[in-house]
């Protein structure tokens, strides 16, 4: 039984053009970076006529992001859509029949929000709702062990074979005028075949090498993009050399897209303070003038030699930094205003 819609002459031409693209693969370098995938409500799909138009423009080589950032925000209502800005010119790359395109972004200090899509233009229909980029490497990063990211799934369009994401990436150092990132692997998280797992090694606590196994990428290739980073420094609050129970914070930066914390645990100090079990990072909250505590559901980062840490907290929604009045570290309230 054929479940595909019938094609008219123009649509058949598009379908045939997709089918003629050949795909090659090459090896993936074996390393693991942290990535959090969360799902949001699915919006309505575009009409088939619009899908055909988008497909035709892609096949003909025309650079076209269907509606751009404004259309993406209208369709998916992403959590941080109000923060992002559309690029002045298209940002995309293609390899192995997969097109990666950026629709909008915004940088704050050492963190950047960006919206992007993956589209299978090969006609092989290799993407689904469980597809994701394994990690992004930052080209020219001083210390790539401090790179962390959070990715939120927005929507999978089965007609155009396109999946959309909202991502926040942070490094240990502020960005310059632009940021170049790349990825070499696209994964299918629904693949759980134990016989297909490959060994990788990550650095755990006390710099010990921890072996583990992960699924291999379903598509390997090379996708590199450069994103302008016009830093919005006027929307960043920074605290330095803060002492709180059980911790010394060298630097804490609050931006609309998250909280970056660098510091170390103290070997001795407040005897009344007890670290949460299995916790390597301090507990950090942000208080607004309304008395509300900023909600956050995830964090990512690393631990340094000894008792050091460098991590980023991803809030559920943008932080209005003009309304921040205090930071709470390990239950100790530190006023800002």
Image (cartoon, grey):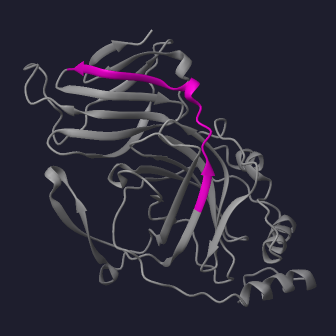
Main SS of the magenta segment? strand
The residue sitting at 74% across, 59% down in the picture is 45
- Hey, which quadrant is residue 49 in on the image? bottom right
The residue sitting at 33% across, 14% down in the picture is 334
**x, y percent for residue 94:** 64, 72
The residue sitting at 53% across, 73% down in the picture is 222
Q: Nearer the viewer, residue 154 or 104?
A: 104
Q: Is residue 243 magenta?
A: yes
Residue 287 versus residue 151 in the image, above or below: above
Residue 237 versus residue 91 in the image, above or below: above
Q: Is residue 43 visible?
A: yes
Is 278 on the left-hand or right-hand side of 74? left
Q: Is residue 6 visible?
A: no
Is 225 on the left-hand or right-hand side of 216? right
- Hey, which quadrant is residue 212 in on the image? bottom left
Residue 163 versus residue 276 in the image, above or below: below
Residue 113 versus residue 8 in the image, above or below: above
Q: In which quadrant of the rendered image does the N terminus lie?
A: bottom right
- Hey, which quadrant is residue 97 in on the image? bottom right
The residue sitting at 64% across, 84% down in the picture is 124
Query: Which range is magenta?
Result: 225-244
**x, y percent for residue 203:** 22, 58
Q: In which quadrant of the rendered image does the C terminus lie?
A: top left
Is 219 on the left-hand or right-hand side of 270? right
**x, y percent for residue 27:** 42, 82
């Amino acid at each position: 039984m054929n479940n595909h819609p019938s094609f008219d002459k123009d649509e058949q031409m598009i379908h045939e053009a997709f089918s003629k693209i050949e795909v090659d693969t090459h090896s993936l370098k074996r390393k693991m970076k942290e990535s959090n995938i969360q799902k949001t409500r699915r919006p309505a799909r575009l009409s088939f006529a619009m899908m055909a138009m988008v497909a035709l423009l892609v096949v003909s080589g025309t650079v076209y992001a269907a509606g751009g950032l404004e259309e993406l925000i209208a369709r998916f209502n992403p959590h941080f859509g109000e923060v992002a800005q559309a690029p002045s010119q298209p940002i995309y790359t293609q390899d192995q029949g997969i097109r990666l395109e950026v629709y909008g972004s915004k940088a704050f200090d050492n963190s950047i929000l960006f919206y992007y899509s993956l589209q299978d233009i090969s006609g092989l229909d290799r993407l689904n709702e469980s597809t994701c980029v394994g990690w992004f490497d930052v080209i020219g990063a001083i210390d790539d062990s401090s790179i962390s990211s959070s990715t939120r799934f927005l929507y999978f369009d089965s007609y155009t074979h396109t999946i959309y994401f909202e991502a926040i990436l942070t490094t240990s150092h502020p960005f310059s005028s632009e940021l170049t990132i790349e990825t070499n692997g696209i994964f299918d998280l629904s693949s759980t075949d134990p016989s297909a797992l490959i060994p990788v090694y990550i650095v755990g606590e006390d710099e010990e090498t921890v072996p583990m196994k992960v699924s291999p990428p379903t598509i390997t290739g090379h996708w590199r993009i450069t994103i302008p980073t016009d830093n919005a420094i006027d929307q960043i609050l920074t605290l330095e050399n803060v002492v709180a129970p059980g911790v010394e914070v060298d630097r804490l930066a609050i931006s609309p897209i998250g909280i970056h914390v660098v510091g170390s645990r103290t070997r001795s100090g407040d005897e009344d303070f007890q670290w949460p079990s299995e916790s390597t990072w301090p507990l950090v909250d942000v208080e607004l003038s309304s008395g509300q505590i900023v909600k956050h559901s995830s964090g990512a980062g690393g631990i340094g030699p000894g008792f050091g840490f460098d991590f980023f907290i991803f809030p559920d929604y943008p932080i209005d930094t003009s309304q921040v009045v205090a930071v709470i570290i390990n239950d100790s309230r530190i006023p800002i205003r």
